[in-house]
Structure formats: structure tokens, C-alpha cells
Image: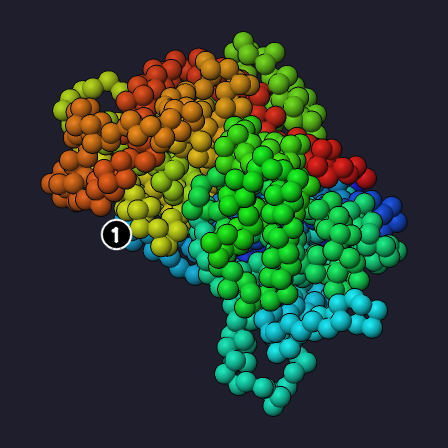
Amino acid sequence: MTNWTVEEFMEDIRKETETQFQKEVSEASHQEIYFAISAIVNHQIDKDWEKTNKLYKNKKPKQVYYLSMEFLIGGLLKSNLLHHQMLDVCNTALEKLGLEPEEIYKQEHDPGLGNGGLGRLAACFLDSMASMRYPGHGFGIRYRYGLFEQRIINGYQTELPDYWLDNEYPWERRKPEEAIEIIFGGTVHMHKKYDGSLEFNYENTDKVLAVPYDIPIVGYQNQIVNTLRLWSAEHTSAESPLEFKDYYHEIDHQHTIEQISGFLYPDDSSHEGKHLRIKQQYFLVAASLKQIIREFKNNGNNDLQKLHEKVVIQINDTHPSLAIPELMRILMDEEGFSWDNAWMVTTKTFAYTNHTIMSEALEKWPTDMIQHLLPRLYMIINEINERFCQGIWFDHPELRLEIPKMAIIADNQVHMARLAIVGSFSVNGVAKLHTEILKQQEMKEFHQLYPGRFQNKTNGITHRRWLLMVNPRLSDVISETINDRWIYRPRELTHLLRHIHDKPLLTSIGKIKQQNKQELANVIYRMTGIKVDEQSIFDVQIKRLHEYKRQLLNVFHIMYLYNELKDNPTLDITPRTFIFGAKAAPSYYFAKEVIKLINTMAEIINHDPTIHDKLKVVFLENYNVSLAEKIIPATDLSEQISTASKEASGTGNMKMMMNGALTIGTLDGANIEIKNLVNESNIFLFGLRAEEVYHYYHSGEYQAYEEYQTDERITQIMNQLRDGLYGYYEFKDIYYHLLSTNDSYFVMKDFADYVETQQCVDQVYRNKDEWLSKSLINIAHSGKFSSDRTIKEYASSIWKIDNI
Ligand SMILES: *Cc1c(COP(=O)(O)O)cnc(C)c1O
């Protein structure tokens, strides 16, 4: 490992700016300095990367491949510096050169290659695998345009293209010599060969070249560098334009190639049956499988019958589940396997993670679309379905009546979750409650058919990025108190519990929170011009905007407090700053109205002198990983208020807890597990339980209109939405939507309990010592939510792999 002195590092920065830009450091722009430092780090990475690849080649361990349509990796300069033990030296060197380190780090454009939690989870997993020396790699798509950049204009969300490759991206390495040809469309012809076996020939297909771009995944100070391989779609050079059989078709195809790795679909937790999206999915799957098999063979294995002994493929939600029929196709059509042998290998190779039970998110593709685009794969999916349904009919007569609910192909649609369950040896949910709901409700027939296939792996977050990197002050104090072993063994954060009565410790944790809040206040001022009170409660809800996440419930609370203050300006409440960050899918009208509502309340409240700055509302635009990194260390109160049963796990809840925030939340997703650790007295719980939510859905007992009419506070808020807020803005659509859907996410039903619980928050916050000791208890238990724990569980009970 490197032991740079500050002087050496400064010298290297000078050398790099000289060779790359022929400039003195003093003449170089921040961006040029950023590139210079990236180059220094890259020299180190390349050495370790080669060593790691050699290590894997020699030891030939079983490898994990994590297939995901999204990887929300965030900025890499700072984390790569940290993981190479260079961050402190670099900071000091920059300061000595008269530069503000953060100014340099923020030159990096976040690759927005994910929507939210699912993509960020994939990134945390890669970090944990490398840091714990597991041979695990990611496969994804190198979208030229990541998730849109959000601007708030007149309170409305507008979307701008996120062209993150504007400048060179220093962390990727293009590998054109490892490109792979992918085939779409055409017609399939079946021939019987002399020996009786079948041969499949394709005609009039479209070809796309998948070119890999590798991003190093640097383990934490352990010299391991794993690989995230992102595929880019390019033209194959083979055919010349003169040979075009169908000119218009060819033009169309050339256009499609541009689009395949063109942009990331901006929908989170919802599914649209778009042609291009399934092309993206097949593109990822086909390229990755070819690469996996190539590597398997390059490692001297020539018996694909043993593929599963050296390879396990985790599919992140159903998005990459075409990998199942694609592997069948390769084994049978290209490697001469029988169906049964191919199926045996396939079902020992794949494991599937389910991320949601919300019906609008479950992927279903029209059969004719798959048939047209992937004719051979469609034949295979059909055969999987036939055999599966017949298997139930003959071997599980008790499930015969359930066949329509379980069939992979039903109503002219391919049900991807069913395909994924049937084709995998493991299906996992992402928090205990979520897994129970899968087993007992949403997938209960499958659980009955395959007892033992379902298991739980509660999500996690990398504590290296989400504590060590983003909150260095807190990390230092923790290390001074309990020693720095927690960095390698995050569970040791529980040793903080021995210091629960350590007044000076609590004081310094309080001070650090205050400093972090001060820094966030500066960010808020720079971004919005709003001055917030750093002594106020920083009440934060940051996550995708979705009805089920109930940002609207938070707004109802704000409107309620404001109405109270208007009636009684001397009302004794603890000052609060409500902070939001959230992107809405561009076509999600309701979600966009909620953004406008938040901004409208901000406009009204922040400019009302009569409430004496007791409330402020801030909407920070373009929520992404780097903004999260600034907000989370400064959070006092973490809003995790989804309708119970809807949030599969949540990971934002874990990040904020780890930084000393207290949670206000429902008993949903991982909140339940947080509660079990910290105890009910150190979390603010409210609202319907999952069973109650199910009960109301089934019984039809809940009447939203009654709720609206009986609770005067709700009546007032709803009427304000309908008639105009304080005589001005109207949000009739939200009003009518809530009533016409019978408040299907129980915003009004949970309102009273939420307000009451927020009053508890207000009271507890007044007692600084009490708040701080709860905060410490949360930090102390957060080690359980390190993704290191999650990855260890995957490794031992799904992947069956060892670290190297
Ligand atoms: C952690 C994270 C999420 C997930 O947040 P939830 O509150 O669990 O939905 C989404 N986006 C970004 C940028 C994140 O860092």
C-alpha cells in the first residue's frame, strides 16, 4: 500500500497537470486538477486491478455476477482516494496548493445510471464485495444519458437531459477488442440434423455490437479491484450499406442501435411495456452471458455442465430475467445440451432478488413483442411454461386451480417474476416483512410449490461511503471512542452503547451534527437563497417521489402546522426546517403535482413574517447520490412514512440512522428491523400496520370521505387544496384523486397518528441530552445495516462462495 507524503502528492499533482494540460497548478482549472488527481489514483488502481485479475485467474474461485439494469455508483474520486488510503494526504496537498478539496471533488459528474434504491443497492453491493475480497462483479448498461437532471421552474419539475459523458469519464476503460455481437429479430428455422438433433438457423436478423467499458471497483485498503462492466451498443462494421436488403428496415435498425444504450428509463417502481426497454434488457443479458461463458472457458473449464460450480448469477429484480431463457438457448443451440441438462444447469446458476410487490411494477411483456424481437427465446419461454404447468398438473394436483395465477405465459403476456422464480434456485426478498409478504401472500403458491426456495436478505448500505466518507467528523469521534476496528467490523459500532452516559461524547456528537447542519444550511442558501435556522429540527424526506412513499402525508403535516400558527402565532413549537429531495417520473402526473405543492407551501411559508421563522420548507432540486451525501450527515429526523407493506426495505432509512438521525416511520420494510434493534423508545412509530392495510383493502371498511369530513384539520387542508391555498393556488387534482381512490395509500387515515407522533418528536427534541442519547443508540445499532452483512449472507446462503 502507498504511503505518500503530502509533498510527494503535491509533486504528483504538479506533474500530472503539466503532462496532461501543460499548465502550472495555479493556472489549471478545478476540472483539470480533478483529472490530474484521477490520473494519480488510476495509476494505483491499474496495478491492483491487474493483480486481482491474476489472482482470480490463478485461484479460479467461484465468481458472482450481479446483473442489473441500474448502478447508481455516485462520485468515485473521493471514495477511490479513501479506499487507497490517499484521501487525507490529498486533502492536505490540495489545501497547501491553495485549493478547497470539495471544490475539486464536486467537478465529478455523478453517473446517474439508476433511478433510486435498486440502483444504489447494486453499487453498495459492489463496494462490499470488493472490500470483503469476494470475487464479485457487476454487469450493466452504459447509458449515454443517465436519469434526467431535475430543475424546479415556477415550482414545477422540469427534466433536462443528463449528458454525463460531456467530458471524459476518467474511471472507465473501453475494451473494444472484447466486444460481443448480439442478434435481434429475424426468423428462426429449425432443421433436423442427420443424428436427429435440432439445429436453429436465423435469417434477416439485426446485429448490434456490445462494447464493454470497465469501471474499477476498489476494495477498501485491501488491493482488491473488481470490475463493473457496462455495455455500450454500437454498429457492427461487418455489413456495408450496399448490401442492405431492406433499406428502411436498416435505417430503422441503425437508429435503434443508437437508442439501446441511449438513456435510462426514468420509472422507478413502475413498468411500461416499451419495445426499447426490452431490447435494453436483452442486450444486457446476452452480452453478459456470452462474457461469463467466455471467462469460464478461458479459465480452463470446458465442461459447461459444471458452470454452476464456478458461476452464480444474481439478477437484480426481474429486469435481467431473460438471462434464464438465454442461457437455455446457448446451452442447447450452441453447446448441444439436451433440454433437461440445460435446465438443470440453468436453474443451478440463477438467483433472483424481488424488490417490490406493487402490481404496477411487476414486469409483463406482450407475447407478440417478445416473439417478434426474440423469436428463439420466445420458443424457449413457451417450452419452460408448458413443462412448468404440466409439472404442476401431474405432480402437484393440489395446485391445479392455481395454474392460471402461476403460468409464465398468461393473457398473452410473459410474466417475468414467474419466469424468474421458476428459473432460479433462490428467490429473496429484501427485508423480513417483505419476504414474509412474498411467502404468505403475493407468491404463496410458488412458496408452496418450492418450499425452501424463498429466503430473506435484508438490504444494507456501505458504511464506508455513507459514514466514513460523508461524515468524517463523526467517524473520527467514533474511532476515538471505540477504536477504529468498526471500519472493518461495523457491528462493533455497538460498543458505543457502553458510552451512552458519556456526556462529553454526547456533546461532541451534538456539535458535529450542528457543524453538518451549518454546512447543509450553506448548501441550501447557495441552491435556493433560503436562509434556514440551524437550531431548528432538520426534518428530511429524500427519496423518489411516489404515492406510496407518502410525501403528501408530510405536506399535510406542514399545512396543519402552518394553519395552527396562523390561528395562533405564539404557538409553542420547536422550529423546523422541512427538507425534501425527490424526482418524479416525467409521466407521473400526481407525483409532479406533489412537487408543485411542496414548492408552493415553501413559497407561502418561507415568506410569511407572521410565523417568525418557526417553519421553513426547502425543496432541493436534482436529488442524487452527491446531494444525498450532503443532506444525510445533517439530518435530525428521517422521514420513512410509506404506507405499511409498500416499501420493500428502504435504504435511505439506514443511511440516516447511521449518521445519528432519529426515524419517524411506519412499521414497513426495514423500519421494523430498525425498531427491533433500537427498541420502540428510540424510534417514532405511527400508523397502520401491514395487516391493517390488508384488512382495509379486503373489507372495504375504510371510507376516506368520512375521514375527510370528521377530522376538522383534514377538512381544512383538503378544502385548501380544492379551493386554493390561502386564496391563491389550487390543487384540485390532488383533492379529487384522494377522494376518488378512497385514499388508497391511507394518507388521511394515518394523519392523526402522524401529527401526534410529530408532537412527540417536538417534545423530545427540546431535551438535547435525551435526543442525543437516542441518536447515539441509533448509530450504535446501525452496523447491522452495513451491506457487508448483507453480502456475507448472500455469499454463504445463496452464492456459496468464499472470499479470497
Ligand atoms: C439511498 C438512495 C435512495 C433510496 O432511498 P429510499 O429512501 O430507500 O427510497 C434513492 N436515491 C438515492 C440517490 C440514494 O442515495
The type of residue carrying mark 1 is: Asn
**Residue occupying image coordinates x 50% and y 77%:** 252
Give the residue at mark 1.
154
**Residue occupying image coordinates x 30% and y 30%:** 700
- Give 402 or 551, whichever is nearer the viewer: 402
Vertical comparison of 715 with 301: above or below: above
Q: Residues within 10 Å of mark 1 (few under 14, many from 20)?
A: few
Residue 299, quarter of the rendered image:
bottom right
Residue 62, quarter of the rendered image:
top right
Q: Position of residue 368 (x, y in %)?
A: 50, 64
Asked if one can make out residue 429 in the rendered structure from this viewpoint, the answer is: no
Vertical comparison of 446 with 489: above or below: below
> What quarter of the picture does the C terminus occupy?
top right
Judging from the image, the colouring scheme is rainbow
Q: Which element carries disc 1, helix, strand or loop?
A: loop
Residue 446, quarter of the rendered image:
top right
Vertical comparison of 295 with 711: above or below: below
- Give 422 or 582, whichever is nearer the viewer: 422
Q: Residue furthest left?
A: 727
- Give 478 or 137, whichever is nearer the viewer: 137
> What quarter of the picture does the N terminus occupy?
top right
Asked if one can make out residue 202 in the rendered structure from this viewpoint, the answer is: yes
Give the number of callouts.
Answer: 1
Q: Residue furthest top?
A: 501
**Residue occupying image coordinates x 79% and y 58%:** 337
Q: Position of residue 766 (x, y in %)?
A: 36, 15
